[in-house]
Amino acid sequence: MENDKKSMREYWRRNIRLLLILLGLWFAVSYVFGILLVDEMNAFRLGGFKLGFWFAQQGAIYAFVLIIFIYVWLMNRLDREFDVNED
Amino acid sequence: MDILTWTYLIVGLTFALYIGIAIWSRAGSTKEFYVAGGGVSPLANGMATAADWMSAASFISMAGLISFMGYDGSVYLMGWTGGYVLLALLLAPYLRKFGKFTVPDFVGDRYYSKTARLVAVVCAIFISFTYVAGQMRGVGIVFSRFLEVQIETGVIIGMVIVLFYAVLGGMKGITYTQVAQYCVLIFAYMVPAIFISMMLTGNPVPQLGLGGTLADGTYLLDRLDGMLTELGFVAYTDGSKATIDVFFITAALMVGTAGLPHVIVRFFTVPRVKDARKSAGYALVFIAILYTAAPAVGAFGMYNMLQTTSNQPMASMPQWVNNWEKTGLIGVDDKNGDGRIQYAKDPAVNELKIDKDIMVLANPEIARLPNWVIALVAAGGLAAALSTAAGLLLVISTSIAHDLLKKSVMTGISERQELIAARLAATFAVVVAGYFGINPLGFVAEVVAFAFGLAAASFFPVIIMGIFSKRMNKQGAIGGMISGLLFTISYIYYFKFMNPAANIPENWFMEISPEGIGTVGMIINFGVSFIISRFTPAPPAHIQDLVEDIRIPRGAGAVVAKH
């Protein structure tokens, strides 16, 4: 029982760490690249796009999709490792 | 075949499909009515969520908004997609594990308080009603423009259809009609977008066409920047909003999205926690297809519009300008009498008035696409409006039948009675929504800012703390919700209704517009809850166990089986 509690605490700690990393990415692609540093990013180009504008109107959205699927994959792995998965 | 025949044919076929699905998927129990029996596959739920989320505003208005706002329009693109990351990572899996029917269910149980539940119910109903009124209006407008019936008749037809499948099928009926509606709306959006992208840039993928080159080899966006600055506007790829305002509006829309009850409940319908996670990913994929095409449609539309009208002789306007002039969406007024159209930033010189909706609605005509494509856009607009309306109506009916009646006022009613109550409540909600569709409050657009602000300042923080802080208690949660709500409501009410003349950046708190103030409301909610909870007793042990339990996926099926 005590062991269980310890392992659950560890599971939660690893979960939070993963969340913080992925939310950091989420913040970077939208708020940093697309808003706060948009003028600096616009000095670079991606084909016909200024880079900051691209992040704000396209890139951030692609990144959001990737972030969710990375989360799904890593969380499923974490669930199995701590034996809390559903199947 | 002419446009009208095509429109009646295609709209008629899609409506027949929705009704057919409704009959096939009737709900027999409250569990089927509220959460579709909890057995929806993650892929189907992703599609349904996408249709649920993308409203008449996303389909009809967003591309036009972006075409006039340029870079500033990014707030909608990032704001209305980034919320899904929050949903997937912070809310959906845990709420699915919690395994009840509604958001007020979670708030009421987690904070062991009827007061908290009631505050949540009132918010859910208010948010959903403001939203649904706009959808019914959208239905009416599409009907009147494409099917040449009165707006009133259009709204009533829309009401009957929604009534039919929402009341009969509940969440089960809504889920499978939303899947069909997603297919209709995405097809209707992408076909004209692909054609126009090919015409302008030679690239069949509009997302890439946006960064592509025009026939003469210059980049589309560079040309657009040049054309607009020449006319005295800000360049397309530059913004005119303050950076802090862009930041706060984006955040309010993201957090608001993650806190909207009709989106959250969709994740109660999948069988397992891992399905809830995956399903949020699928939902965003389906949404992203439209949301990455929208900025392209906006830019193409602006380019086409300037190319066709700016400084061109009035006598040589193409047919679509005349067609849409009749609807009042385009207005030309030759102020200086030179027989040409001057489009300019200065209102004294500007001779062209354009409604933003035209960028999507008139697209097929601008690109000279066949009549069936125009009919398809009508069916797509209706699909977008109806699917969102149905999702919202379900939240209203669930809030009334389940949270108010069953859990608060008449706790003794049987499941059969609750199901009847839910159906009556859905009928009542449709009628009220229809009334506001026919007699719109003059400020529907303003009210939407309200809905997002409220969701951001109330539900989002209270749910997050319920999951991630075991120490958060009912005093903290109620205090936080009320202070966040009061602040947000007063700020929006003051600038939007009481003193609209003062609604300028100089008067705003830290240059944050009413659209972005929900973010500040959210921060206040978090802060107040934290402080109050530290000075009041910790929640009882069984609540702390509940929090531990929702944090691990295993056993999600068992929670549902208790119903």
Image (cartoon, coloured by chain):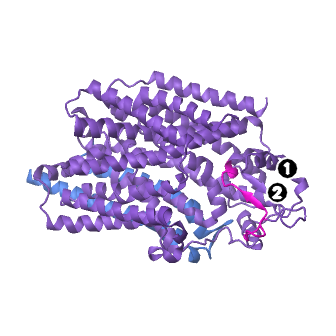
Q: Is residue B153 left or right of residue B430?
A: right
Q: Is residue B38 left or right of residue B546?
A: right
Q: Does B357 appear in magenta?
A: yes
> Can you tell which mark lies on residue B318?
1
Residue at position x 55%, y 43% in the image: B439
Task: Quarter of the image for the N terminus of chain B: give it.
Answer: top right
Crowding near the residue tagged with mark 1, few <14, some 14–19, many ≥20 C-alpha atoms within 10 Å = few
Crowding near the residue tagged with mark 2, few <14, some 14–19, many ≥20 C-alpha atoms within 10 Å = some
Residue at position x 45%, y 76% in the image: B510
B46 or B457, nearer to the observer:
B457
B507 or B70, nearer to the observer:
B507
Q: Which chain is purple?
A: B
Q: Does B97 appear in magenta?
A: no
Residue at position x 63%, y 27% in the image: B12
Report which residue position mark 2 lands on.
B308
Question: What is the chain letter for disc 1?
Answer: B
Horizontal and vertical percent position of residue B85: 42, 55
Q: Is residue B446 left or right of residue B141?
A: left
Question: What is the chain letter for disc 2?
Answer: B
Query: Is residue B242 at least partly visible in the picture?
Result: yes
**Span of residues in magenta:** B343-360
Q: Secondary structure at mark 2?
A: helix
Q: Identify the colour of chain A in the image.
A: blue
Say whether marks 1 and 2 touch (CB < 8 Å): yes
Q: Please state which amino acid type lies under the numbered disc 1.
A: Pro
Q: Is residue B92 left or right of residue B148?
A: left
Q: Main secondary structure of the magenta part?
A: loop
